[in-house]
């Protein structure tokens, strides 16, 4: 019984992966604020740097 269950899980995951690879992704309309951010990638990079700096400070404080 366990063997057939796990074979079914494995087969289902493989079939799902294949279907996911061949199906086209759904394009959702972007909100206006996201569209503005995508126009200026420098802002996104600066925000990402700030987030990473804050995370690294938090992690270093936890480690101490």
Image (tube, rainbow, N blue to C red):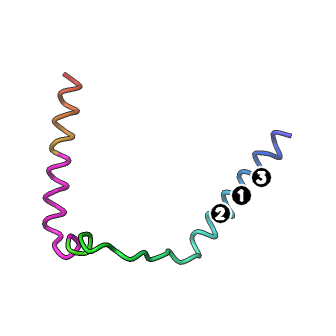
Q: Residue 50: image x %, image y %?
A: 14, 50
Q: Residue 30: image x %, image y %?
A: 34, 74
Say which element carries label 2.
helix
Quarter of the rendering containing residue 64: top left
Mark 2 highlights which residue? 16
Mark 1 highlights which residue? 12
Disc marking residue 32: none
Q: Which residues are magenta?
A: 37-52
Please tell me how crowded label 1 is: few (under 14), some (14-19), or many (20+) other residues with Cα within 10 Å: few
Q: Residue at x 16, y 53 (%)?
A: 49
Mark 3 highlights which residue? 8
CB of mark 3 within 8 Å of CB of mark 1? yes
Tell me the chief SS of the magenta region: helix
Marks 3 and 2, how far apart at CA: 12 Å
Q: Residue 62: image x %, image y %?
A: 23, 26
Residue sitting farthest toward the right = 1
């Amino acid at each position: 019984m366990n063997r057939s269950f796990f074979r079914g899980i494995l087969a289902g995951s493989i079939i799902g992966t294949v279907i996911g690879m061949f199906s086209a992704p759904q394009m959702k309309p972007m909100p206006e604020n996201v569209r503005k951010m995508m126009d200026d990638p420098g802002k996104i990079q600066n925000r990402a740097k700030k987030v990473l700096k804050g995370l690294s400070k938090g992690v270093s404080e936890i480690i101490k």
